[in-house]
């Protein structure tokens, strides 16, 4: 069940991203060999730490990159055995998974602290919601902002999704390590960990795609 | 065609038809005979135990009367089969080892043939369990097998076979057959003496053993000392005496019989002793938690008329026709709370443990320590008999608990013996040498080996083995080899001992154990994960003693993990990772706390924003 759902979810996610790329390509995107090469180089340069960044900015980027690396390792070790071999994680996979998990947890916590301010929802993110609320409560509309001002709504949503799901993900596995929950609850916690990992993975993929897209459009 | 030929043909046809008709009648009557239920075969529903006031029948089916000569021992087959289907009962688990159609099921405790004179210790069984040897391969006939091990058998099975050795057939006429002794299990009489039964078997008094063991008869004399021409009907060298007042006025005898076998009856064949831990001092050891709770052995190990008793392991239902086989397991009771069994919660135990371990891994046998214990069992060490060797070093040497992978890939506690025997090697196939031949060929060479304690191995040197193998080379076909301590020893082309080799036949024989069960509060893992997951935890890194008569091998040991199908480095690395487990918890909880604070803070800010918008509306 989980395996099938995961495969479908990943396929849908990647198909969605591909469709988005085709339907609304980034600036200067094309399919000529020169353009593809340029895009790949651009993608690669995104891994570099820009000189103009402040110390906090450098730290934020490094933590982000480390979190991304941990995510890849955790996703491969966590989903790999299940999706490729239809086995539960065990052996060296499990040890690798458990080694990178706390680093990922720290990175997420740091990123949550550093990025939360940037990812706050503002009025410009929800003009339609604002209008709706004002209409419902009968308030006068002020500062007529009708269009989204490139607020990165998708990134913000996925960021907060990542933060919330990560909390669930970490708590579900850590609480199973304490002698509080019996076998039934242990199985429930493991299922929670599995499904929240799936949702987190999808959110991270979409979030990363949106960041790359935003960077390339700059 | 001549008239004569016609008559011939008609006669031939008639004969064939008559033959077929007779065969059909016989076959139908045989089928009807086996289906016929006797009065004791089917319960009428009463839970009361019927009083067994019955007449005694001898081996020929004649009633035994007091004062009538010759006084013969009663036959269980004849006496009991008036009311109970002996043939059906004789196919039960305790009697069907020799039945090739009987499903062997999970590996069990073998019979262990021991001879310190030839440094032999070898697991035997008629059941085709991997790792055991068929007695015939060592030249042990069914008669000899009964003589060796009948002491701890309830009779039947191999004891009732016609011996496969013609010489033994004559002796079998003298000794009789070892019929099923129903009283071995079902007697509630305090005078039922299984030690006497064992003594009678040692004297080859198979025919007399059941009578001698019961409380109202005694037997004098020994079949083993009688000539081949001995006839029990003509000669009273082996005399049976029934005690006074045994028979009532109708020449009937009262058997104190219970349907549910008392624990003490099971114990005679199924006792275990922790050598060196509690020693033979029973009062220092705790009994199985189920027995302490008031259950009896047969509350779990149940059977019907067919005596196909449940062994109680998971997966038994695939091998057994007993309808309770699926539910008479740990899980069967403890998931449903049957008989008041507590339903376990296993707080903090990851469910993967239930896939990789049996229940017994954590709950059965003694708490593991750095080195395995040595154990004794009734059947291996003749416990409870008059001549059992009480020395802690008495052979066979059984090690336990060994946490090893069993056939279903799960790890379970096992008992283990290291086979030691003389064999021939042909095309990498090891065949044990007939015991008598081995005794003749190597006995003299090994007699010079320095004895240790009574019943223990003598101390062998490589020189002893070399000389013994050189002697064997003259008498056997193929390459003579000696197996001991998990290694195979043979001679090189120059006739000198070559280095020990690994061989599957040299591997130890392990059988799973289930008792004594410890309560939850004393199970492995109850204190912390490090009960097992530590770099020196006995579960993975305990040492299994390698038992060998060879002096150089006497201090050798193997790590437990080598029996578990796990790479030792992986087991070590995984155990080592538990050092960091508390850090992992702290880091993860700290991260959760930080993320929680961020969510709370920005959640409150969002709430403030919503409230502000609402206030603006007002």
Image (spheres, rainbow, N blue to C red):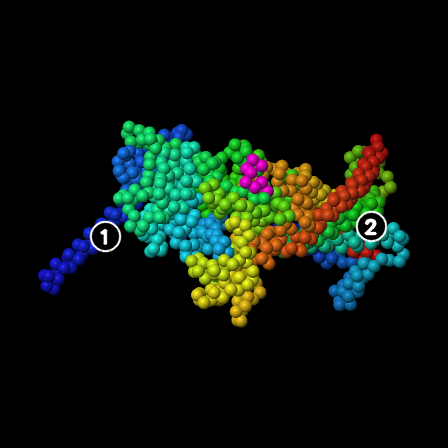
**Residue placed under numbered mark 1 in the picture:** B20
Residue B333 x %, y %: 53, 37
Counting every numbered tag in the picture gives 2
Residue at the image position 17 percent from the left and 54 percent from the top: B14
Q: For this rendering, which residue is in front, B436 or B335?
A: B436
Q: Residue B280: say if magenta.
A: yes
Q: Quadrant of the C terminus of chain B?
A: top right
Between B577 and B391, the residue placed more toward the observer is B391
Q: Residues within 10 Å of mark 1 (few under 14, many from 20)?
A: few
- From the image, tell me which residue sits under label 2: A150
Between residue B519 and residue A215, name the one nearer to us: B519
The secondary structure making up most of the magenta span is: loop
In the picture, measured across the screen, residue B496 lies left or right of residue A74, that is left
Verify whether residue B614 appears in magenta.
Answer: no
Return the x and y of residue B288 as percentages of the image width and height.
55, 37
- Callout 1: SS: helix
Q: Is residue B258 visible?
A: no
Determine the residue positioned at 69% across, 50% down.
B535
Element carrying mark 2: loop
Residue B576 percent coordinates (x, y): 71, 50
Q: Residue furthest bottom?
A: B494
Q: Residue at x 84, y 47 (%)?
A: A114
Magenta-tinted stretch: B277-284
Q: Is residue B589 left or right of residue B212?
A: right
Residue B609: x and y in percent read: 83, 37
Q: Is residue B75 visible?
A: yes
């Amino acid at each position: 069940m989980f395996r099938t759902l995961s495969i479908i979810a990943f396929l849908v996610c990647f198909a969605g991203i591909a469709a988005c790329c085709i339907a609304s390509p980034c600036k200067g995107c094309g399919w000529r060999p020169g353009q593809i090469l340029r895009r790949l180089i651009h993608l690669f340069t995104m891994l570099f730490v820009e000189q103009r960044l402040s110390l906090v900015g450098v730290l934020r980027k490094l933590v982000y990159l480390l979190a991304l690396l941990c995510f890849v390792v955790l996703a491969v070790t966590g989903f790999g055995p299940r999706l490729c071999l239809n086995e539960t994680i065990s052996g060296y996979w499990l040890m690798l998974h458990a080694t990178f998990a706390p680093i990922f947890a720290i990175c997420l916590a740091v990123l949550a602290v550093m990025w939360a301010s940037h990812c706050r929802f503002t009025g410009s993110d929800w003009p339609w919601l604002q209008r709706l609320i004002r209409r419902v409560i009968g308030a006068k509309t002020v500062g007529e902002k009708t269009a989204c001002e490139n607020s990165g709504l998708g990134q913000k949503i996925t960021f907060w999704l990542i933060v919330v799901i990560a909390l669930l993900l970490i708590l579900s596995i850590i609480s199973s390590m304490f002698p509080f929950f019996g076998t039934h609850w242990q199985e429930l916690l493991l299922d929670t960990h599995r499904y929240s990992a799936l949702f987190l993975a999808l959110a991270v993929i979409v979030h990363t795609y949106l960041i790359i897209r935003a960077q390339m459009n700059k | 065609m001549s008239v004569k030929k016609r008559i011939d043909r008609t006669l031939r046809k008639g004969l064939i038809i008559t033959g077929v008709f007779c065969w059909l009648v016989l076959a139908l009557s045989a089928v009807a005979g086996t289906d016929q239920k006797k009065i004791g075969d089917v319960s009428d529903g009463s839970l009361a135990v019927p009083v067994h006031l019955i007449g005694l029948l001898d081996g020929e089916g004649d009633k035994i009367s007091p004062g009538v000569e010759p006084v013969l021992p009663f036959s269980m087959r004849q006496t009991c089969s008036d009311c109970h289907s002996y043939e059906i009962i004789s196919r039960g688990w305790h009697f069907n080892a020799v039945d090739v159609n009987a499903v062997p099921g999970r590996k069990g405790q073998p019979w262990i043939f021991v001879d310190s004179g030839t440094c032999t210790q070898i697991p035997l069984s008629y059941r085709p369990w991997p790792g055991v040897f068929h007695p015939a391969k060592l030249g042990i006939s069914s008669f000899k097998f009964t003589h060796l091990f009948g002491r701890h058998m309830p009779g039947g099975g191999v004891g009732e076979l016609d011996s496969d050795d013609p010489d033994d057939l004559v002796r079998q006429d003298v000794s009789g057959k070892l019929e099923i002794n129903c009283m071995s299990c079902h007697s509630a009489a305090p005078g039922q003496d299984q030690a006497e039964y064992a003594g009678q078997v040692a004297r080859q008094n198979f025919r007399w053993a059941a009578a001698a063991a019961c409380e109202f008869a005694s037997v004098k004399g020994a079949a083993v000392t009688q000539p081949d021409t001995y006839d029990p009907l003509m000669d009273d060298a082996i005399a049976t005496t029934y005690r006074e007042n045994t028979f009532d006025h109708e020449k009937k005898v009262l058997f104190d019989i219970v349907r549910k076998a008392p624990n003490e009856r099971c114990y005679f064949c199924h006792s275990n002793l922790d050598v060196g831990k509690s020693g033979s001092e029973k009062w220092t050891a705790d009994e199985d938690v189920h027995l302490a709770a008031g259950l009896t052995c047969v509350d779990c190990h149940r059977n019907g008329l067919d005596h196909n008793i449940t062994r109680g392991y998971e997966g038994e239902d695939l091998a057994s026709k007993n309808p309770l086989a699926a539910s008479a397991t740990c899980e069967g009771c403890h998931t449903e709370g049957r008989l008041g069994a507590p339903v376990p919660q296993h707080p903090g135990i990851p469910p993967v443990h239930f896939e990789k371990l049996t229940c017994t891994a954590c709950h059965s046998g003694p708490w593991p320590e750095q080195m395995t214990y040595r154990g004794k069992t009734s059947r291996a060490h003749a416990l409870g008999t008059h001549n059992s060797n009480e020395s802690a070093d008495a052979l066979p040497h059984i090690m336990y608990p060994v946490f090893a992978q069993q056939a279903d890939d799960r790890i379970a506690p096992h008992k283990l013996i290291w086979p030691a025997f003389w064999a021939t090697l042909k095309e990498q196939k090891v065949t044990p040498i007939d015991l008598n031949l081995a005794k003749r060929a190597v006995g003299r060479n090994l007699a010079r080996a320095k004895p240790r304690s009574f019943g223990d191995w003598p101390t062998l040197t490589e020189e002893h083995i070399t000389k013994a193998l050189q002697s064997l080379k003259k008498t056997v076909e193929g390459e003579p080899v000696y197996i001991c301590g998990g290694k195979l020893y043979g001679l090189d082309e120059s006739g000198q001992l070559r280095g020990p080799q690994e061989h599957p036949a040299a591997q130890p024989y392990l059988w799973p154990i289930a008792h004594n069960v410890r309560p939850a509060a004393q199970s492995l893992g109850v204190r912390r994960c490090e009960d097992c997951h530590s770099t020196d935890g006995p579960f993975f890194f305990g040492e299994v003693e390698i038992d060998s008569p060879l002096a150089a091998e006497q201090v050798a040991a193997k790590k437990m993990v080598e029996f578990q199908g796990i790479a030792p480095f992986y087991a070590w690395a995984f155990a080592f990772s538990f050092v960091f487990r508390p850090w992992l918890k702290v880091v993860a909880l700290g991260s959760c706390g930080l993320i929680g604070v961020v969510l709370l803070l920005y959640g409150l800010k969002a709430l403030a924003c919503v409230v502000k918008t609402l206030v603006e509306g007002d």
